[in-house]
Image (cartoon, helix red, strand yellow):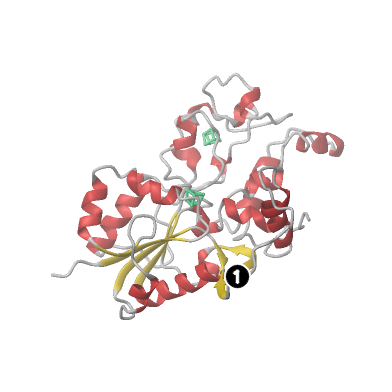
């Protein structure tokens, strides 16, 4: 019997999602031998043309990580959508836009200037910027278009399932692959982790008081961590508004949650839910004092929207910095 075909493609990604497959340890061999991989740029030299030649829906599942920022990424995800029965958004960047999505706070031009002209390690006296078409020795070279903004995968194509996390953790990946191979998948659109907040699974949960109140926010390096709930110690922890399933990875490394698994199903928007949850524990009704306490939060937009700006209902209505 033919093995199911699978693809593992990256878009605007750091490569960490590919690394997460290695975290499966010996199970990665079982996974890779159970499927016939047809595209996996990080490890295998398939050509896009090979994918174009496949029949529609010939690929059983495409795992797509990274956000969408270029015309090449858009073209490839649309091609994989056409050729696949299931498309799974793999990792926070694909699920919600992720860290690359923070670029939506800036204009495309200022990003290019920073990367190719202003950065400390760049030597570019002619201030040349990448162009879509360049002629070199009579030959025309082409680059993909760099879009004005970053998109989550479901803003570009229809997505069947989501594996959250930055990067996804081995058990979630393993369970998803087993469910796929057995044909035991939940309803379309499901996020393949439990629908409850991280606090419910957190090893520090017992020390989280029923009523939290905070007069000043601190950063992790500013406290002598006593092992209690981070919020109880005045450090912002987004476990209160973030979906569980990460095996408390950051908490177990003595770092607060930063929200990479995104929200639970009943929450429309990660960033505003997180900021309203944090605002609700500020212990004063005095406006000036509230402002002073809020000022102790460093980079609130980057904190509350670290993984979710492109998917935010704020859409294009965000204040562009430059
Ligand atoms: S989700 Fe995290 S690990 Fe995966 S590509 Fe994005 S930044 Fe990298
Ligand atoms: S707020 Fe953070 S540290 Fe406290 S119980 Fe929730 S996840 Fe754990």
Can you see residue 158? no
Tell me which residue sits at (32%, 56%) in the image. Answer: 176
Front residue of this view, candidates 139 and 142: 139
Residue extending furthest toward the left? 1
Can you see residue 67? yes
Residue extending furthest toward the front? 137
Residue 20: x and y in percent read 38, 47
Front residue of this view, candidates 155 and 197: 155
Q: Please give left or right for residue 157 compared with residue 23 in the image.
A: right
Quadrant position of the C terminus in the picture: bottom right
Q: Please give left or right for residue 209 compared with residue 89 in the image.
A: right
Residue 217: x and y in percent read 70, 31
Front residue of this view, candidates 310 and 129: 129
Residue 214: x and y in percent read 70, 30
Tell me which residue sits at (41%, 39%) in the image. Answer: 247
Q: What residue is disc 1 on? A: 145
Against 231, residue 7 (above or below) is: below
Residue extending furthest toward the right? 288
Q: Secondary structure at mark 1?
A: loop
Q: Please give left or right for residue 42 compared with residue 4 in the image.
A: right
Residue 313: x and y in percent read 65, 62
Mark 1 crowd level (few <14, some 14–19, many ≥20, 10 Å Cα): some
Quadrant position of the N terminus in the picture: bottom left
């Amino acid at each position: 019997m033919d093995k199911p075909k699978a693809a593992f493609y990256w878009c605007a990604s750091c490569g960490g999602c590919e690394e997460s497959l290695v975290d499966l340890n010996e199970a990665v061999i079982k996974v890779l031998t159970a499927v016939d991989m047809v595209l996996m740029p990080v490890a295998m030299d398939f050509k896009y043309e090979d994918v174009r030649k496949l029949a529609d829906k010939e690929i059983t599942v495409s795992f797509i990580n990274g956000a969408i920022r270029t015309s090449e990424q858009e073209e490839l995800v649309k091609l994989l959508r056409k050729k696949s029965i299931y498309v799974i958004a793999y990792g926070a960047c694909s699920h919600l836009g992720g860290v690359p999505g923070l670029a939506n706070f800036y204009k495309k031009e200022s990003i290019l200037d920073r990367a190719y002209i202003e950065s400390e390690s760049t030597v570019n006296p002619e201030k040349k910027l990448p162009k879509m078409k360049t002629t070199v020795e009579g030959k025309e070279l082409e680059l993909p278009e760099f879009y004005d903004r970053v998109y989550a995968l479901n803003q570009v194509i229809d997505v069947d399932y989501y594996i959250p996390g930055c990067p996804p953790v081995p058990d979630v990946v393993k369970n998803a692959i087993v469910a796929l191979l057995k044909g035991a998948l939940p309803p379309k659109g499901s996020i393949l982790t439990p629908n409850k907040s991280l606090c419910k699974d957190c090893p520090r949960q017992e020390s989280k008081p029923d009523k939290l109140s905070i007069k000043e926010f601190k950063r992790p390096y500013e406290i002598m961590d006593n092992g209690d709930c981070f919020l109880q110690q005045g450090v912002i922890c987004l476990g209160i508004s973030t979906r569980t399933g990460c095996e408390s990875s950051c908490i177990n490394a003595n770092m607060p949650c930063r929200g990479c698994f995104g929200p639970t199903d009943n929450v429309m928007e990660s960033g505003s839910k997180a900021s309203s949850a944090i605002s609700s524990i500020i212990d004063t009704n005095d406006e000036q004092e509230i402002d002073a306490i809020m000022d102790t939060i460093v980079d609130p937009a980057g904190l509350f929207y670290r993984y979710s700006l492109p998917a935010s209902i704020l859409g294009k209505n965000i204040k562009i910095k430059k």
